C-alpha cells in the first residue's frame, strides 16, 4: 500500500506569543489524545508528566520512532543542533496510513526569515500527503520562515511585547494591531484563535 494519500486535509497550525502567553499550553490542549506525536523540544516541556516519553539520545529516539506506530515521543535538544536530523527522521517515517503530529515548540532558534530549509521545508510543503500534521510555536513570528507562515490554516495569537510583532501578526491575520497589543498574559492568557482571513475569535485560558 502507498504511503501517500492525496485526499488528506492540510493541518498546519502556528502558535505565537511572548513567553508566558500560553502557547505551549494551547499546543498540548490541541494535541488532545492524538496517538502518534513526535516533538522537537528545546525547553524540555514535553515529558512523562504530560504523557510523553522523552529522549536525549538520538539513537534511542530513532529506534523508538521506527518500532512504534502509536506513541508520543519528544526529543530534547537544548543545543538546537539536531533540528534537521529530527525533521529528516520524521520525513522518512511519515506514512498516510498512520497520521503523525509534528510539534516544534520553539521554532525561533532553529528557523530564519525566508524560505524554510532542509527537511523542515519538505514537512511543510509535502508532508500533508504523507499524513503529517504540524504544530509550531515561536515568540516572534517575524523571525521564522515564511514557508510555514504561508501555509498556516490555523493560528494562536497570544500576548506580544513589541509593537513590531503585533504589526506583523496583524498583517498576517487581519486582527487589529491594538487588539493584539491589548491581550493580557497570565493569569488571563487572553489570545485570538485564527482560522483564516477575517475568521478569528478572542478567548482566554
Image (tube, grey):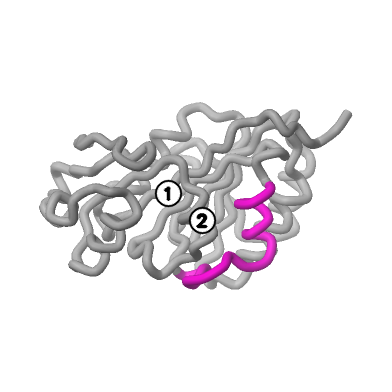
Expressed as whole percent of the image width and height from the top left, the position of residue 5 reads 75, 32
Q: Is residue 168 left or right of residue 74?
A: left
Name the quarter where the N terminus is drawn: top right
Instruction: State if disc 2 and disc 1 touch (CB < 8 Å).
Output: yes
Give, as a single range, the part of the protein colored magenta: 109-126
Answer few, some or many: residues within 10 Å of disc 2's Cα (few below 14, many 20 plus, some between 14 and 19). many
Residue nearest the viewer, comparing 59 with 117: 117
Task: Give the residue at mark 2.
Answer: 148
Answer few, some or many: residues within 10 Å of disc 1's Cα (few below 14, many 20 plus, some between 14 and 19). many
Point out the tag, 1 or 2, that comes first from the N-terminus. 1
Q: Is residue 140 left or right of residue 111?
A: left
User: Which residue is depicted at the point 24% across and 69% down?
Assistant: 164
In terms of image quadrants, where is residue 122?
A: bottom right
Q: CA distance from mark 1 to mark 2?
A: 8 Å
Expressed as whole percent of the image width and height from the top left, the position of residue 188 reads 14, 42
Task: Give the residue at mark 1.
Answer: 14
Q: Secondary structure at mark 2?
A: helix
Whether residue 192 is situated above or below residue 9 in the rendered picture: below
Whether residue 35 is situated above or below residue 153 in the rendered picture: above
Name the quarter where the C terminus is drawn: top left
Expressed as whole percent of the image width and height from the top left, the position of residue 110 reads 52, 69
User: Which residue is depicted at the point 44% across and 59% down?
Assistant: 106
Whether residue 140 is situated above or below residue 30 in the rendered picture: below
Residue nearest the viewer, comparing 186 with 183: 183
In terms of image quadrants, where is residue 30?
A: top left
Amino acid at each position: 500500500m502507498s504511503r501517500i494519500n492525496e485526499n488528506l486535509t492540510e493541518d498546519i497550525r502556528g502558535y505565537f506569543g511572548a513567553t508566558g502567553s500560553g502557547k505551549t499550553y494551547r499546543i498540548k490542549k490541541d494535541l488532545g489524545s492524538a496517538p502518534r506525536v513526535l516533538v522537537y523540544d528545546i525547553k524540555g516541556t514535553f515529558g512523562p508528566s504530560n504523557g510523553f516519553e522523552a529522549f536525549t539520545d538520538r539513537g534511542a529516539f530513532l529506534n523508538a520512532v521506527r518500532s512504534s506506530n502509536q506513541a508520543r515521543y519528544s526529543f530534547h535538544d537544548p543545543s538546537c543542533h539536531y533540528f534537521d536530523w529530527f525533521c529528516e527522521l520524521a520525513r522518512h517515517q511519515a506514512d498516510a496510513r498512520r497520521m503523525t503530529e509534528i510539534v516544534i515548540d520553539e521554532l525561533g532558534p532553529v528557523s530564519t526569515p525566508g524560505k524554510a530549509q532542509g527537511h523542515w521545508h519538505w514537512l511543510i510543503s509535502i508532508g500533508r500527503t504523507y499524513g503529517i500534521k504540524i504544530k509550531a510555536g515561536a515568540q516572534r513570528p517575524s523571525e521564522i520562515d515564511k514557508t510555514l507562515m504561508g501555509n498556516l490554516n490555523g493560528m494562536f495569537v497570544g500576548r506580544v511585547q513589541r509593537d513590531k510583532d503585533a504589526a506583523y501578526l496583524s498583517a498576517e491575520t487581519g486582527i487589529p494591531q491594538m487588539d493584539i497589543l491589548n491581550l493580557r498574559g497570565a493569569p488571563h492568557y487572553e489570545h485570538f484563535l485564527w482560522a483564516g482571513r477575517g475568521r478569528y475569535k478572542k478567548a482566554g485560558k
